[in-house]
Amino acid sequence: MQIRSLETLVRIAQVQSFSRAAELLNMTLPALSMQMKTLETDLRAALFDRSTRPPQLTPLGRRVADQARRVLAEQDRLTELCASDDGLNGRFNIGIIQTASVRILPRFLADVARTAPGADFRFSSGLSETLGAMVHSGQLDAAIITRAAPDLRGLTYDVIATEPMFIATPLHHADSSLNDLARSLPFIHFTPASGIGKLISRALDHFPAEPQGIVILDSVEASVESVKYGLGYTILPLPDLERYGEGQLHIRRHGDRPMSRDIALITRATAANDTWRGHLLGRLRAAI
Amino acid sequence: MQIRSLETLVRIAQVQSFSRAAELLNMTLPALSMQMKTLETDLRAALFDRSTRPPQLTPLGRRVADQARRVLAEQDRLTELCASDDGLNGRFNIGIIQTASVRILPRFLADVARTAPGADFRFSSGLSETLGAMVHSGQLDAAIITRAAPDLRGLTYDVIATEPMFIATPLHHADSSLNDLARSLPFIHFTPASGIGKLISRALDHFPAEPQGIVILDSVEASVESVKYGLGYTILPLPDLERYGEGQLHIRRHGDRPMSRDIALITRATAANDTWRGHLLGRLRAAI
DNA sequence: TGCATAAGTTAAGAATTTCTGATTTTTATA
DNA sequence: TATAAAAATCAGAAATTCTTAACTTATGCA
């Protein structure tokens, strides 16, 4: 069945004449006549009563024309969808690391629900490495990760935010040097399996003394809580320390140029993604 | 835009592979590939990211595929409509004479609403002649009229019911002969412009004596009421006399074979109408 | 890394479909 | 009844779409 035939049928139903319909549709009468005939054989239905000169729609024909209008309406919506494509249109599958999701997602989703009604975001969380692989294989359209990710070949890497890494100690260790800390408290190490964990391992190498003990946790919030309760000291991105620490721990920088971690958006580096990557980045940066 | 392209798009979205989709749709891979390319240029949209081997749908592409599913669903409804055509399907424009509408319509519509959900009847009332012309010209699909209609050339004429015409007099004239009546009471004549009115005129010619006075009314109900109140005598179809008379008038037949009027369905005598004429007739006869 | 294989794309020709113009048939109107 | 208008039919032309074959590109495995 041809969509064109449906358009023709609807026009005929409107003007009640083959010849006038043909005129309006810029086609010849025989073409129109044959379209209707093939439509009738396709549907195995008598749409017209041809015993009268402008052929009359049969009752069934009228109903078919009504339904044809509905088909065309849905088809119009389809073209509108593409015409109104502002870049953020469709279902986006996006991966995001745990830490980022807590801070970014709520504001991002609120913003986007307002300004990009054509977009539908599905988030799933995971570790930077996993997400990187999924973007690479096309399972995800994009991912919000932290650096130290896998190979970025074929991917774009756009920084959303840079967060300095600060050392956090219990309040009563505010004046202890790093050496003192290393001797008296265990170091709380966010899991080295994560992107940020790798940064922490590197930071640890530059400490003047190796901590006497190391506790590995896989939750930022749990790490901060542990420091609050005086169970150890740690190094984490400043925003996380501020968010969970709530003033109940002492924060210091290490060295002149503190280590920092990037939160970045990765996407496949293809032309198709160029249409929306910029839009997405803008909203993500605004949501930090 | 081709409906076929939408079908293949939906299939691709389902199986996530061009080659598998082509296989399932019984077409060659190049054909499928080109369909998608022309669809993309038609819509001026990038539906696929072709940098990966099974090309991935872009976010916009996913949305377009969703909408394509809707287009196809409406198209399916269209074919179903025709497949399930039991003869009474579509919008029927039907004319009906006033007298018949009162008695037939309610039961007919109730029956049809139950047994023919695909049909949608629009009734308009008028005189037999007018309705006959409208059926002839195709403005109406059918009409319920009374005989004595115009020329029936090109029309089918199927009797729905035959109603005998009886003479009605006030109760206190139950024993008066027609001659007595003609002398003492005016004759109440339903408008000769109508089909039934013409029959009445003919009946009047066969009366033994010409009534002294004639009152013309254009309402059956008003005629019967007038007789009830002793204002005259009349001749009308028996069912009407019983309906409005409610035992408050005297009814007699005239001659051995009383005159009768037919209520009939007329339609254009075309093949297209053969599919539903029988169905319609059956329900009308049941609704009497 | 590099080759082999699978998956898509491109290109040219064939087949189908659709359209046009001329002609015939049918219906409506004077 | 004649005439004009409208639609159907037919044959050939034009435009699509499809298929086969050659080519390119991604992916997986040694």
Image (cartoon, coloured by chain):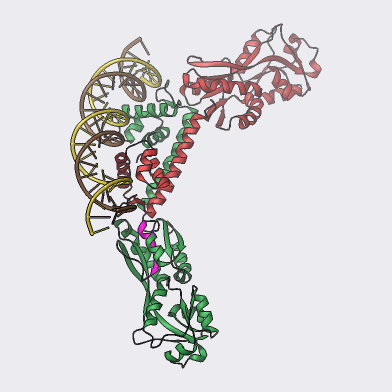
Chain colours: A green, B red, C yellow, D brown
How many numbered marks have been drawn onto this rendered protein structure? 0
Q: Is residue A283 magenta?
A: no
At horizontal 62% and vertical 15% (from top left) the residue drawn is B262
Can residue B42 be seen here? The reply is no
Q: Is A181 positioned to the left or the right of A266 in the image?
A: right
Query: Considering depth in this image, is B162 or A47 the residue closer to the camera?
Result: A47
Q: Is B210 positioned to the left or the right of A236 in the image?
A: right
Q: Position of residue D20 (x, y in %)?
A: 25, 34
Q: Is residue A147 magenta?
A: yes
Q: Position of residue B31 (x, y in %)?
A: 30, 39
Query: Considering depth in this image, is B218 or A11 the residue closer to the camera?
Result: A11
Q: Position of residue A191 (x, y in %)?
A: 45, 73
At horizontal 72% and vertical 20% (from top left) the residue drawn is B241
Can residue A7 be seen here? The reply is yes
Question: Measured along the vertical axis of the image, is residue B217 above or below residue B73?
Answer: above
Question: Measured along the vertical axis of the image, is residue B171 above or below residue A148?
Answer: above
Image quadrant where one finds the C terminus of chain A = bottom left
What are the residue bounds of the magenta stretch?
A134-153
Q: Is D13 positioned to the left or the right of A277 in the image?
A: left
Question: Measured along the vertical axis of the image, is residue D19 above or below residue A104?
Answer: above
**Residue B86 image-quadrant placement:** top right
Image quadrant where one finds the N terminus of chain A = top left
**Residue A41 image-quadrant placement:** top left
Q: Position of residue B59 (x, y in %)?
A: 39, 55
Question: Measured along the vertical axis of the image, is residue B74 above or below residue A241?
Answer: above
Q: Is B207 positioned to the left or the right of C28 in the image?
A: right
